[in-house]
Image (cartoon, rainbow, N blue to C red):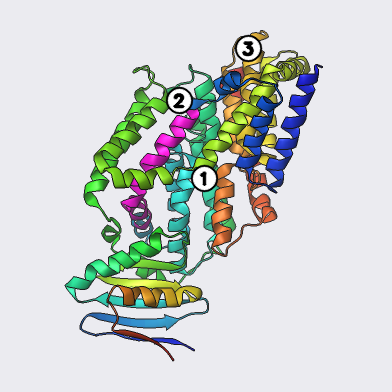
Amino acid sequence: MEQQAILAIGIFLVIYALIISEKIHRTIVAMIGGLLMVLLGIVDQETAIHHIDFNTLGLLIGMMIIVSITADTGLFKYIAVWSAKKSKGDPVRIMISLSIITAVGSALLDNVTTVLLMVPVTFSITRQLRVPPMPYLITMIIACNVGGTATLIGDPPNIMIGSAVPELTFMAFIYNLAPIAIIIFAVILPIFVLLFRKQIQTTPELKQSIMEMDEKELITDHKMLRKCLAVLGLTILGFFLHQLLHLESATVALAGAFLLLLLTGEHVMEVALTRVEWLTIFFFVGLFVLVSGLIETGVISQLAAQAIELTNGDPVATALLILWLSAIASAFVDNIPFVATMIPMIKEMGNMGIANLEPLWWSLALGACLGGNGTLIGASANLIVAGMAGKEGHPIKFMTFFKYGFPIMILTVLIATVYVYFRYLI
Amino acid sequence: MTLTYRHNKEVIQISETPNVSDVEFDIKVLAEDKWAGIKELQRTFEDNDVHTDVLFYPYENHHYKVIVRIDYYADFILGLMKHHLLESVEWV
């Protein structure tokens, strides 16, 4: 193996280990990793920039802007309280309805944004009912990752895959992944009800206090809300039609975001742009450049060749290997860096003779998204919920989440295995 | 030392129920010119980085339940004072 390749692997492994260890913020680590690839001449700057997936970044930025402005109108709090009232203030029904809202929100917005909206509302409702927030937060994390599996824009792995593979359009993701996401969600929700129902009991008086709330008071700006809903609706419609319109998803998202900024004014723009998760964006930038070092030195090609050798190029074995490898790996390392590494590998498998790559892409998407439920570090949304919960005095310990998340993850990947096998491989 | 406050009962009705880790306030804002103030106070606490410091639950007719974490009691009382919802605040 060439010296450059060995150096690239060394840098990659060290950076990966630092990301997992969380001793230094992962954005700093990823950016340093990317910069090392350039500084040490493994890739030049132009090549590095070429490997940055600006479609992924643009999509995330656009949606973050739209959602942060919409959140200021109180819409998401309204939806949560409205659903709590529809649930008659019952803690178990509220857990179900908040999970459904999280799953749907996660499918249409991105995971990180969804949990940033739902966690504060969850604290508010659980505090009023005097029930522990932990069951709601754990269920929310799982629902978020499952819901995000359903669409191209729902989960960062899907955004990255959809961006790298133009044939996998928004509708293709819905057609292929939404059914299995819905099935999985329907299976796991009753499990959570059984697991947590005894922990979340409250009094009739506290239920009544939920019922008497005036959720309309939570909407702070009706005029802005109308603008936000119109733009959100247009943006989502744009995603459905993006193939027809020959537009990338980032163009749709950024068009929506800046249309909304045009309608809402300069002050809103200043606040909205500060609320973009720039740490996440730069994490992606660093990661893309880091992985570019492995691509340009041929490491990815070699890994792909070895994977094909392992499975003899058999589509069934290859797809299921990718599904389970992605799931297990995504459980223990953040699924974003894992997918960033796998995408070029699968493309290389295509170059090496595997004719139909679609089952592999869906296996990667399912494995990476569902695998994110395995541990607290499996997905960005998990870490954000845990971070927010810790700040509010309700820390979610790694092992606490693991004992719920890992078995659920295994179950969901088993269901996905059956789906992938019968839908694509026979 | 505890923080005590006085309010005009024709402007605002306030009652407190202390719990282990928080205090529940039952607030009814009677004076129309104070409605914006309580909303502004709500916005202040909702926009900050702490999600569970002060939680507002709106009901009809400018009636609010507010759950205030013990460590934010003073911030909340002073916030009410800032928005002219209290007449005086004193350490005793």
Report the front residue among A413 and A44. Answer: A44
Give the residue type that dot 2 points to: Tyr
* Marked residue chain, label 1: A
- In this figure, which residue is indicated by the disc labeled 1? A143
Question: Which residue is identified by label 3?
Answer: A350
Q: Which residues are magenta?
A: A56-81
Q: Are marks 2 and 1 in contact (CB under 8 Å)?
A: no
Q: Earlier in the sequence, mark 2 or mark 1?
A: 1
- Look at the numbered disc 1 and give the secondary structure of its residue: helix
> Vertical placement of A241 versus A145: above or below?
above
In depth, the one of B2 and A354 nearer the eye is B2
The quarter of the image holding the C terminus of chain A is top right
Identify residue for label 2.
A175
Residue A188 visible to an observer of this rendering: no
Closer to the chain start, of discs 1 and 3, is: 1
- Evaluate whether residue A101 shows in this view: yes
Q: Residue furthest front?
A: A39
Q: Above or below — where is A32 with respect to B56?
A: above
Q: Are marks 3 and 2 on the same chain?
A: yes
Packing grade of label 1 (10 A; few <14, some 14-19, many >=20) is many
Residue A73 colored magenta?
yes
Label 3 secondary element: helix
- CA gap, disc 2 and disc 1: 20 Å
Q: Which quadrant is home to the N terminus of chain A?
A: top right
Q: Are marks 1 and 3 on the same chain?
A: yes
Give the number of the mark in front: 3 or 2. Answer: 3
